[in-house]
Amino acid sequence: MSGVTAGELERRLHEISPRWTNSPTPLPSILIHGFVFAAWIVLLFNAFFGRGIFAWSVGVVYILYDTALLLFTFWKTWPLRRVVLLLPITGPRPTVTAIITAYNESAVLVATIEALVRQSEPPDVIMIADDGSTDATDGVLSAYFHTPPPALGTLAETGGLNWLRMQHGGKARTLNAALTHVKTELFITVDADTILAPSAIAAMRDAFAADQNLVAATGVLTPVCDKSSGGWLLEWFQSYEYVRNFLSRYAWMRMDGLLLISGAFAGFRHDAVLAVGGFDADCLVEDYELIHRLRLYGYDNQLGWHTNVLGGALGQTAAPSTLPKFLRQRRRWFGGFLQTQNWYRKMVGASRYGDVGLWMLPVKAADTMQPIYGLSAFILLPWYICTGRIDLLIPVGGLIVGKIILDLGFHCWSIFLYRKWVGGHTKVNFPLAILAAIIEPFSFQLFRHLGASWGWLAFLTGKRSW
């Protein structure tokens, strides 16, 4: 299963990734991306010369686009109102290595390991891949393993517990080093600040055993912040955001278009990841980019590979508790998203890549500009007030109120579906959901767009730090 060196992984990456193969950009991709950008220019220009509510056409388009995505999610998640039947397991249950990547996470590392040890079906191997931590990680792991730290670049094996100690080179490089030591059929990535529910590994095993063409799957995560007032507020907003986002992933999974797999807790078929060259250390979101490469390779070689999101594989993961950390996270996420969209632009609008090419990636092309549309729409409102165009605020306000009411309905419906999907395990509740739906468009959503706009700057300036 293993026997692949880091150098071999990099060679395969260069052979497969479009950013190294210099693939030409097809006309459909150019037209789709060009239209999204040109439409923003035209709509923004119209703000200065248009009349009535259509002077705010950039906001109208922004609301209509977001509404279309909500309706799509509602349509595709409709089956969740009933119990979701699992696929029958037709093959043997696969062996699993859980890889915990850590960098200066000594305070939480033991709790994460213990959550894996206490699984109803523990992984065959637990590997701690330390990315050159400079805190107390060595001491914590030495006490836990009852062994001195291994030399840099080497693996210490203690029964089913392995400790890989690397020089600091980033999460993707450390993961690739870990992959060269994996001997199981599956590997699961778990961030050091992520605690899995007791049945999470069993749910992953079930999914891969039932579907031999499944190459990657994501668990369903709940964000956890610290106990400060700012942490409580950000956890509140992010909890509902995560509910909607994971339901959206379920919707795209039903279209065979799921591309977003959360590396904080994800399962992968080991041979498939080795075949495409492992993780790309130059990408700000190495997990997201890897899924694009797996789907590209699967389509090009007619392998029938696909991805999944598992409502039974649950976990809690640390989320930003302060606004600066939140904005930096969203800068990295969106900057990496733009990197990946650029590298895989040849797939956009291409029928040979199925619904990924025909639907998912064109939607992602629109998403590249969504935060710019949203911020533009918001900034125009005070500008209209300052320039005396108060008459515009009545129809615009009516449209915004209508959107809030629609969002509120979807918000409540999504919580109902989510609870059924994950078996009732959720801390979100309807009263707070109603309040969040009302105030989110004027608070949290703006900060999300600000972080994403900062991601545009990271992308344009070539920032590569993790």
Image (cartoon, rainbow, N blue to C red):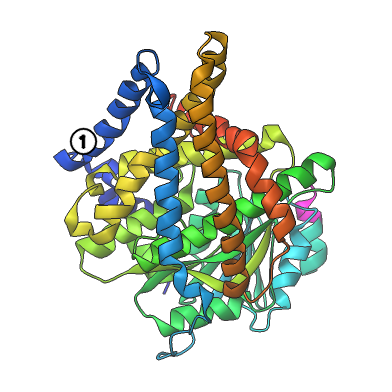
Secondary structure that dominates the magenta span: loop
Q: Give the x, y percent position of residue 461.
A: 44, 24
Amino acid type indicated by mark 1: Ile
Image: magenta residue range:
132-139
Is 122 above or below relative to 229?
Answer: below
Q: Is residue 369 visible from the viewing direction of this image?
A: no
**Does the segment drawn in magenta span residue 194?**
no
Q: Nearer the viewer, residue 376 or 101?
A: 376
On-image quarter of the N terminus: bottom left
Is 451 above or below relative to 203?
Answer: above
Q: Give the x, y percent position of residue 39.
A: 30, 28
Residue 397 sits in quarter = top right
Q: Nearer the viewer, residue 7 or 434?
A: 434
Residue 200 sits in quarter = bottom right
* Residue matched to label 1: 30
Q: Is residue 278 left or right of residue 275?
A: right
Disc 1 element? helix
Residue at x-position 34% and y-position 17%: 45
Q: Nearer the viewer, residue 276 or 296?
A: 296
Q: Give the x, y percent position of residue 132.
A: 65, 47
Is 362 above or below relative to 40?
Answer: below
Q: Is residue 392 visible from the viewing direction of this image?
A: yes
Residue at x-position 18% and y-position 56%: 351
